[in-house]
Image (cartoon, rainbow, N blue to C red):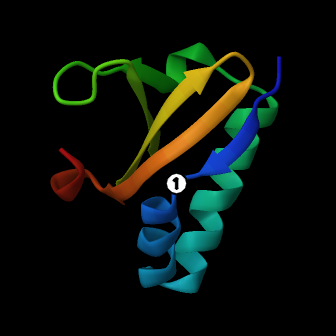
């Protein structure tokens, strides 16, 4: 099952602040996960992100919510900044 991807405006701003090479790697990683989701690459989060999932891509974390086949990316940041 593949996901359709939507980005929260805050996630888009966070991507725009990054180095273009890193931003492309993150976008490619999100796209690859959305096309072939591997459950071992994600973790369900607890407070304060109730219902959200975390996807690890190198030193970055992608916080997203899942609704059916929709993947709503809400936050992208380095590990130390995301929580």
Residue drawn at (73%, 35%) of the image: 34
**Which quadrant, please, contains the C terminus?**
top left
Residue annotated with mark 1:
8
Note whether 20 is above or below 31 in the view shown: below
Residue depicted at x 52% and y 54%: 8
Please state, as top left, top right, bottom left or bottom right, where the N terminus lies in the image.
top right
Horizontal arrangement in the rendering, residue 75 relative to residue 33 (left or right): left
The answer to which image quadrant residue 32 occupies is top right
Task: Give me the residue at 66% from left, 47% from top.
Answer: 6
Report the side of 58 relative to 3 (left or right). left
**x, y percentage for residue 24?**
65, 70
Pick the front one: 10 or 83: 10
Closer to the camera, 3 or 39? 3
Left or right, 21 with reference to 47:
right
Total residue callouts: 1
Q: Secondary structure at mark 1?
A: loop
Q: Find residue 37 and report its horizontal and vertical position in percent.
A: 70, 24
């Amino acid at each position: 099952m593949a996901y359709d991807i939507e980005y929260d405006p805050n996630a888009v701003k966070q991507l725009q602040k990054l180095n273009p090479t890193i931003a492309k790697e993150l976008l490619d990683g999100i796209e690859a996960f959305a096309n072939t989701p591997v459950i071992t690459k994600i973790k369900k989060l607890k407070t304060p992100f109730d219902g959200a999932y975390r996807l690890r891509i190198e030193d970055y974390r992608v916080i997203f919510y899942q609704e059916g086949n929709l993947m709503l990316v809400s936050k992208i940041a380095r590990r130390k900044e995301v929580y």
